[in-house]
Image (cartoon, rainbow, N blue to C red):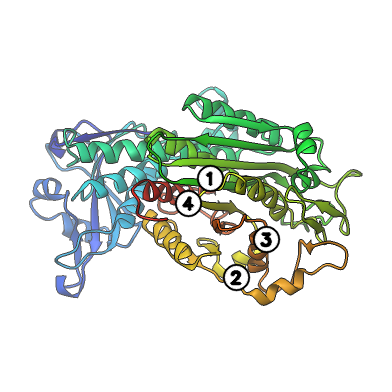
Amino acid sequence: MTDLTLSTAAAAGLRADAIVVGVAKGTASKSGTLVLAPGAEAVDEAFDGKLVAVLETLGASGAEGEVTKLPAPEGFRTPVVLAVGLGPAPERDGGYATEALRHAAGCAARALAGAKKAGVALPLADAAAVGAVAEGTLLGAYSFDTYKAAGRGGSGGRGGKNGKNAKPPLAEATLLGGKPRDKDHKAALERAAAVCEELNRARDLINTPPNDLDPETFATLASAAAKEHGIKVQVLDEKALVKGGYGGILGVGAGSASPPRLVKLTYTHPGARKSLAFIGKGITYDSGGISLKPPGHNETMKCDMSGAAAVFAAVVAAARLGLKVNVTSWLALAENMPSGSAVRPGDVLRMYSGTTVEVLNTDAEGRLVLADAIAKASEDKPDVIVDVATLTGAMMVALGNRLFGIMSNDEAFRTAVHEIAEGAGEPSWPMPLPEHLLKGMESPTADIANMGERQGGGLVAGLFLREFVGDDITWAHLDIAGPAFNEQGPFGYTPKGGTGTAVRTLVRLAEAAAEGKVL
């Protein structure tokens, strides 16, 4: 991961490969011209106050994510100035939004792949800005090259066509204007490093091909990382799952040669007053089972364990930050494959809670593994349960590829989670749980079916999960099917492939609970 430091040094004297400055689109009150963001003053002065004119000549507009490179002015110890767009300039009394800073820092970090060091002179008005720029830099610099020639320790990545042109991520970034002796600035930097390192670990897991990440391997990796940070680990293997009656997880994993696992990771703080349970869907590969997915829908199904990756990263981050709250993450891990032993449409499963479920579609498997984990987690009586899952294509139809849906049995909590997600830079939208949709899941054979009406399928899935939440427990469901895996090109600090969506939301929720701001 990119090394970050804070420095009050002058931009001109910094030895680096590039200096990053921010530019914005002028508002009506600023004559609609390009505007330099705070932090760029020294660079502008070296250009005799003509940096804006030079950038405009090169076509810069200040649009969000726009990157413009130009030679550094005489007297600088860096060869390049990189101007990155922040979008519309704020009004006179307002500062730049933290998400705009994250986005700009991420774009700059991606543009500087291959560089050894950069000086980042974006606006750092306060500790929140320091944290945002740090997050954007660390997340934007992410790359997954384990399976490329360079990642295998080859000759500089020249062993293959794709590895040949691969550039390593930005090695080091110095945040100019950050105060290394200011405790708030230092804390913001350290928080960003901990959260982003765990989020990038989640991205690595999501990007790992399923032949190298089955349920047992995932459980082993998660256990090792948790133990490193003082987190208690319990892993239920297939024998323990049979003994415990986890019919949902066992049913989903029945068709695979790789048996399922249920992993419990528990972080406790002696001063904690609240307890949170995070539950993640961990389908390490989803073929659809007997209800096989059609061609064109299988290729990215390694990402169906993104929810488990998110809750794993969140509990480790909480431990590293020493949050005064108890957090337990449950990873419901299975591989959904077709075979002679696989669950069939029409089969009935007896879940951990004792509820029987008629399986009408084996590709609606995520709700089955989550239901067992939710019922088990409810026995601990946490203050809240939040499950995270790449659950339904219907949510992608409703919200697209960049927003996740939030459902809950408590409207106030749903609103709180939505606001926390937005503040973390993870777009979301509150969704309802219409009671009339329950009728579609009535089964003549079992207590409930795992499918209901096709229209509103994402809401049907949420209603199904609600049935397994313990009495008097506040619960929320995050359907991250859209933003969990980016199949398009990178943008801002979001790479192509696994994104780590929901990690920052969960960490902020844990921080808010520790501070008594929610629950």
Residue projecting furthest to the right = 340
Q: Earlier in the sequence, mark 1 or mark 2?
A: 1
Residue denoted by label 3: 467
Q: Nearer the viewer, residue 261 or 37?
A: 261
Percent across and percent down for residue 347 are 88, 55
Pick the quarter of the image with the C terminus: bottom left
Q: Quadrant of residue 233?
A: top right
Disc 3/disc 2 C-alpha distance (Å): 12 Å
- Helix, strand, or loop for circle 3? loop
At label 4, the amino acid type is: Pro
At label 2, the amino acid type is: Leu
Left or right: 117 as drawn, with respect to 397:
left
At label 1, the amino acid type is: Ala
Residue denoted by label 4: 490
- Kindly check if marks 3 and 1 are in contact, taking CB atoms under 8 A apart as contact: no
Disc 1/disc 4 C-alpha distance (Å): 20 Å
Q: In the drawing, what numbered circle is on residue 310?
A: 1
Q: Nearer the viewer, residue 125 or 76?
A: 125
Residue projecting furthest to the bottom = 436
Disc 4/disc 2 C-alpha distance (Å): 33 Å
